[in-house]
Amino acid sequence: VSFLTDFFFLQKYSFLLFLMGLLLPLVLCTLAACCSARSVPPRPPPSIMLSRGCNDSDVLTVAGFALQDINRDRKDGYVLSLNRVRDVREHRQVLGSVFYLTLDVLETGCHVLTRKAWKDCGVRYIHRSVYGQCKAIYYVNRPERILYLSAYNCTLRPVSRRGIHTMYPEYLEAALESLAKYNSENPSKKYSLVQVTQASRQWVVGPAYFVEYLIKESPCTKSQASNCALQPLDSEPVGLCTGSMTQTPMEKFVSVSCNFFEQQGPASGGEVNAANQGPAHLPGVEESQQKVVAPTPGLPPKAVPKGSVQHLPDLDDEKNPEDAEENYHAEPCPVKLDLTTNPQGETLDVSFLFIGPAEQKLLVLPFPEDEQHSAECPGPAQQNNPLILPP
């Protein structure tokens, strides 16, 4: 009996072990599936872009070539010069390096059709400056001596008139002093200042300030002159005045002359004759700020442009002063450049840059965000005036 009891016990124990052997893999698989479903996803691989110093010699060389190719690609507007490298990333690949460049630029006095190098063109005086930012994707293969601009976009904006007047209050003083002189010599009507359109200064026998400004008829009396200094920008101007103010140790010299637009002459008794009247045209307005440029005849058929240059108005040209104030704290020259939005990137066929039938492709990634730039960026500026440097 004892033998049979032990036998049946061993049989039952063996059967239980057999069942456990069958069930254990199933239990382990179930646990593994549950654990994997709840596990934290693996970290993404580190960025394959290398943050470079904005003042590195090779970076400055690449930035100069990129800006040169941007100017060559354009068919209208003025040559852009490099003020500073704001940000740069390098993506090293088997075929070479792809640079993602953010450049702070200044407009020069050379038209792009002159094909002059940007280093040979002088930038404008501060009161006539046009500044902005360009983003470019630039391919460099040093062994094959290949430099290729893949894409670019630029945004430009004229310098703030309000900023100029704040930084150089003498310009506003010269406009107001010369306009006061004109009003005193022409008592039949009173005119008030709309805006200063151009300003410059030089040393003669003392500091001399030269201004051009728009005027409008003022409803104010002479007793209210202090309240008529600056009219809203949507006021209709009736004329353009040029004035100067020269300060010597002994006295102040002020001169003024005004031209009135068509059908907007002064009342009888004014000193401006009909010969000075003309169409409503404002001399000195920068051609670079015009939105529409007539095509130049005789040009060869142009290739598809690799980018564009967007012209924004002066920040002061907002009709709502509250909006203008907000714009001063916003990004002044927003630029977007994305050949792809795929985080993994897209391939770009560059076989045409090489000799031979082999297919050659680059990986192009989404343009990096500025907030992640190197501690060595932005680089030093050629023109360090805050009015022409995007923050």
Image (tube, helix red, strand yellow):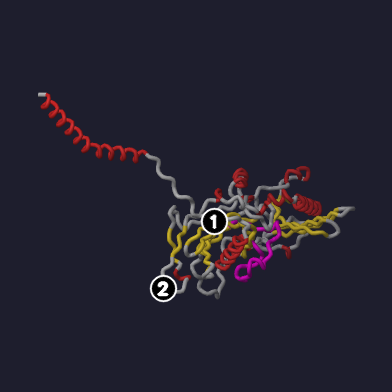
Q: Position of residue 315 (x, y in %)?
A: 62, 51
- Return the x and y of residue 25 as percentages of the image width and height: 25, 39
Q: Nearer the viewer, residue 55 or 114?
A: 55
Q: Which residues are magenta?
A: 107-133
The residue beneath circle 2 is 357
Q: Quadrant of residue 73?
A: bottom right
Q: Amino acid at mark 1?
A: Arg
Dot 2 crowding, Cα within 10 Å, few <14, some 14–19, many 20+ = few
Tell me the quarter of the picture where residue 291 sits: bottom right
Q: In which quadrant of the rendered image does the N terminus lie?
A: top left
Of callouts 1 and 2, the N-terminal one: 1
Specify few, some or many for label 1: CA neighbours under 10 Å numbering under 14, 14-19, or 20 or more. Answer: many
User: As rendered, which of 352 and 324 lies closer to the eye?
Assistant: 352
In the displayed structure image, the side of residue 269 where residue 356 appears, left or right? left
Q: Residue at x 36, y 38 (%)?
A: 38
- Does 374 appear above or below 26? below
What percent of the width, then of the height, locates residue 98? Answer: 51, 61
Residue 249 in view, yes or no? yes
> Mark 2: which secondary structure?
loop
Which residue type does callout 2 highlight?
Answer: Pro
Name the residue furthest top: 1
Q: Is residue 188 in view?
A: no
The foreground one among 274 and 95 is 95
Residue designated by label 1: 89
Which element carries disc 1, helix, strand or loop?
strand
Q: In the displayed structure, would residue 1 be above or below residue 136?
A: above
Residue 123 painted magenta:
yes
Magenta stretch: includes residue 281: no
User: Where is residue 270 drawn, in percent x and y?
Assistant: 77, 57
